[in-house]
Amino acid sequence: MAMEIKACLVVALRSFFFLSPTACQSCPEYQKQALLQFKSSILAITTPSIFNSSDVSQLLQSWNSSSDCYGWVEVECNDSPNSTSRVVITGLYLDALFTHLSPQPRVESSMLAPIFHIRSLEELSISDNNIQGEIPGVGFANLSNLVLLYMEGNNLSGPIPPHLFHLPLLRDIYLRDNSLSGQLPADIGNLTSLQRLSSQNNSLTREIPSCIPASLGALKALKLLNISCNKLSGKILVSFGDLENIETIDLSHNNLSGSIPLTLTKLQQLTILDVRNNELIGQIPDGGQMGTLILYPNYFANNSGLCGIEIHLPCPKDDGLPLPPPPPQIKKQESWFLWEGVWIGYQVGLLLATRFMVLIGYFTLPPPSNCRHPPHRPIGGRGRN
C-alpha cells in the first residue's frame, strides 16, 4: 500500500509541474515482469551480502512485485501513444550498477534479454556495467521506438550489429570505451535521424573505405562523429563533406594517411576537427569554417606532413621551376675554428626553431590521451553532455 501511495504522489507531482497529465495508472504487467526478471538475473550473479551492501540494492529495492513499476527508481513511464488510459515504460537509466563492488561481477550481454520485451522503450542507458559479449542485435531489433542508446564503458566485443541501424528513430548511439571490432555497417545510412555517433576507444582496425561506409555522408542530421582512439587506417572520406549539420568530427589517435579532403570546407557548422596523432600529409584546407580552426592548432598535432595557416606552418611552394644547381664545392681544408662555429650555430638554431614551434602550438609533446573516460554518470543521473 505504501508503494502504491508513493507511485500516486510521483504522478501527482508530475501533473502539478506540467510534466505529464497522466493520472495514477499502472504500466503493463508484462513490462513489470520483464524488469523483475532482469532484477533476478542481477541477483543471480551477486552474493546476498555483497548485493545488500551495494548501491544497486538501494536502486532495485523499489522493484518488487507488490508495487507498480510506474513508481520504480530509474524507470520512466509516459502515456502510451496508442491509448489514453494507460502508461508504458519509455526509459531505463541503469548506469554503473556495480561501480562500488570489488570485484565487479561478470555481466553477460544475454542478461539484457528481458529488456527487449519492452518495445515502448525510447531511452536505454546501461553504461559502465562490465557487460561482456557481443551486442545482441536480434534483441535490439525489437526496440523500434528507441531514440537514445548509451552502452559506454562496458567490455562489449565483436562487430557492431547492423540491426542497430534499422531502428528508424535512433538519434544518439554511444558505444565508446568497449572492445568492439570490425566495421560500421553500410546500413548506417538508414538512420536519417541520427545526430550523435560515438564509438571511440574500441578496436576498429580496418581501412576507412571498408570500415566507414560512404553512406555515412547521407546522415544529414549528424552533429557529432567520434571514431577516435581506434586503429583505423586509410584516407579520410570525401563524403564527410556531405555532413551538412556536423559540428564535431574526431578522428584522432588512429593511423590515417593521405590529405584532408577539400570537401570539408563545405561544412558550415563545423567547430571541431580533431585529427591529431595520425599520419596525414599536405595542406590543411582553409576555406569556410576550416579557416576558424586556426585557433586550435593542437587538433592537428603529431601529423608530421601537415602544413597550413591552421598550424602556422607555411606549405612549401611548388612553382614547377627546376632547382638551381648546387654551388661548386671548394676543395679547401676548413679550419677547426670554422667547424666549431657551424656546430654551435646549428644547435642554437635548432633550439630556437623548436621553441618557436612549441609556442605556436604545433610541435608539441603528444597530448594526453583522451581515449579513456571515467564512469559516465552515477546512479540516478540522466542526460548527456
Image (cartoon, grey):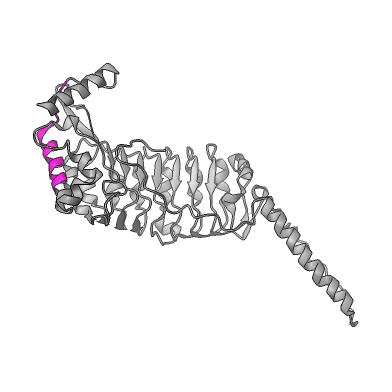
Q: Which residues are magenta?
A: 24-40
Give the residue at x 19% y 48%. 51
Is any atom of residue 318 visible in this view? no
| Image quadrant containing the C terminus | top left
The x and y percentages for residue 14 are 26, 21
Of residue 161 and residue 379, the one placed in the foreground of this image is: 379
Is 184 left, or right, of 293 in this rendering?
Answer: left
Answer whether residue 220 is visible to the viewer in this image.
Answer: yes
Return the x and y of residue 191 as percentages of the image width and height: 35, 42
Left or right of 309? Residue 265 is left
Outermost residue toward the top? 16
Residue for point 74% across, 59% down: 353
Does residue 114 show up magenta in the picture? no
Q: Residue at x 13, y 41 (%)?
A: 36
Q: In this view of the protein, which residue sits in the foreground, 285 or 180?
A: 180
Most frequent secondary structure within the magenta stretch: helix
Residue 140 position within the rendered picture, expressed as x and y whole percent measured from the top left: 23, 46
Q: Quadrant of residue 335?
A: bottom right
Nearer-the-camera pick, 62 or 264: 62
Residue 159, x across and y down, in percent: 31, 57
**Up-down relation of residue 166 to residue 29 (above or below):** below
Instruction: Name the quadrant containing residue 382.
Output: top left
Question: Where 124 falls versus 138 (above or below)?
Answer: above
Vertical relation: 63 (above or below) 158: above
Q: Look at 64% across and 57% down and name the residue there.
A: 363
- Answer whether residue 30 is magenta in the image: yes
Q: How many marks?
A: 0
Q: Quadrant of the N terminus?
A: top left
